[in-house]
Image: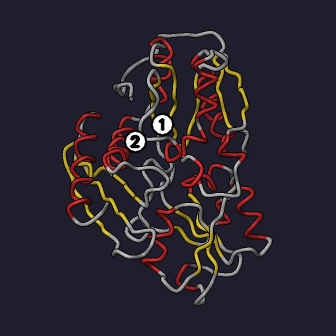
Amino acid sequence: MLASPTPTHYQPVTRLSTLRIATRESRLAHWQAEHVKALLQPLGHEVSLLGMTTKGDQILDRSLSKVGGKGLFVKELEVALEEGRADLAVHSLKDVPMDLPEGFVLACVMEREDPRDAFVSNRFASLDALPRGAVVGTSSLRRVVLLRDLRPDLRIEPLRGNLDTRLRKLDDGQYDAIVLAAAGLKRLGLGERIAQVFEPEKMLPAAGQGALGIEVRAERKELIEALAPLSDQRSWMAVAAERAVSRAMGGSCSMPLAAFAVYSGEYLQLRAAWGDPDGQAPLVRVRSAAVVADLEQAAALGTEVAARLRAAGAR
C-alpha cells in the first residue's frame, strides 16, 4: 500500500517529537537511516535510531528464495513499528516485498541513487575481460539469468552477506568477480571498487533498485505529512511502475525478474526482463511507455508490461 505522493511545492507544517527510525545493523542500512535523520533534523524533528538484526541478516548459508524471501529483511522492523518502539523504517526498496502487511504503507520514496548494477573485481576490468570458467558471485536470481545470457561460459556461484562481507569474500579470492548494486557502493564511499557499471540495456536493474522507501503505520497521518518533504515524485512513480510488474508476476526473490523505468519528458518508459533459472527457456524482454502522472497510472503501466511478459513466454 502506498500513501499518495505530495506535490513538490508542498511546505511541511507538522512538527513531531522524537522520531525513532528502525534500521538493520549493517553499515549500509545505518548510512541510509543516518541519511534520513540528517534530512529530518533541519525540519525541526528530533531523531534517534533503533538498530535491529533481522532474520535475513542472520541466515547466510542459504539463498533468500529458499528461506522466506525479502520479507526476512523487514519483518522485525515492522514489528517495532507495530509495537510503538519505532515510528518509521528506512528500506532499500529492492528488499521490500511487493505487498506490505495490512496497516502499513510507504510514506514516501526518496530521490533515487544510481539504479545500475556494478561489476567488482580486483583482477579484471569488465565482464568481457573474464576468462572462460571464471567464478562470479551474486545472490540474485535476476543477475544469474542476465549474466548467463551475457556470458554462458562463466560459473555463477551464490554470494550472501552484507556489502562488506561480500567484498571481503572477493578480496579473499573466493570469486574472480562479484556483482553488486552501484548505489550501495557509492553511498558508502566505495565507488572506487567499481570496475564497470552495467548500463540497463545490458543488465536490467531490479524493481526499486537504488531507491529508498520509508515505511510507517497507515494510521500515522501526521507522520506521513511530516515525511512528505523527503519524497521525490518522479522516483516514486518509476518504482511504483517497476513494483507493479513484479506484483503482477507474483514477484519475489525466487522470481528471476528485472524491471526498470525512467522518465523521458512526460512519458515513463518501462522495460522488464524474465529468465528461466534452470536455463530451459530464452530470456524474455519487453518494454512499453505511457504518460504517467500518478501512482495509479504507474501501476497500470506496470500491469501492462507484466501482461506482455507473460504473452512472450514468461511464467
Q: Quadrant of the N terminus?
A: top left
Q: Secondary structure at mark 2?
A: helix
Q: Is residue 167 above or below residue 156?
A: above
Q: Camera-side residue: 216 or 119?
A: 216
Judge whether 84 appears above or below 38 on screen.
above
Instruction: Tell me what residue is drawn at x 60 percent, y 31 percent.
Output: 36
| Direction from residue 38 to residue 239 in the image, left or right | left
Give the spatial CA distance, label 1 vs label 2.
7 Å
Residue 246, image x, y percentages? 37, 49
- Dividing the picture into quadrants, the one containing residue 286 is bottom left
> In screen coordinates, is 93 left or right of 19?
left
Assess disc 2: are there few (<14), some (14-19) or many (≥20) residues with their C-alpha within 10 Å of its C-alpha. many
Q: Which residue is mark 1?
A: 110
- Residue at image location 51% in from the left, 28% down from the top: 215
In this rendering, would 182 be left or right of 6? Answer: right
Q: Earlier in the sequence, mark 1 or mark 2?
A: 1
User: Residue 217: horizontal and vertical position, in percent?
Assistant: 50, 19
Q: Amino acid at mark 2?
A: Ser
Check disc 1 and give the amino acid type: Met
Q: Are the residues flagged by discs 1 and 2 in contact, CB closer than 8 Å?
A: yes
Residue 65, numbered circle: none
How crowded pointer 1 is (Cα within 10 Å; few <14, some 14-19, many 20+) is rated as many
The foreground one among 60 and 185 is 60
- Against 79, residue 154 (above or below) is below
- Give SS at disc 1: loop
Quadrant where the C terminus sits is: bottom left
Image coloring type: secondary structure
Q: Which residue is mark 2?
A: 235
Residue at figure coordinates x 71%, y 26% from the top left: 49
Q: Could you say where residue 73 lies in the image, as x and y percent from the top left?
A: 61, 41
Q: Which residue does the image show at 59% across and 65% down from the upper left?
A: 138
The picture places residue 190, in percent across and down from the top left corner, at: 68, 58
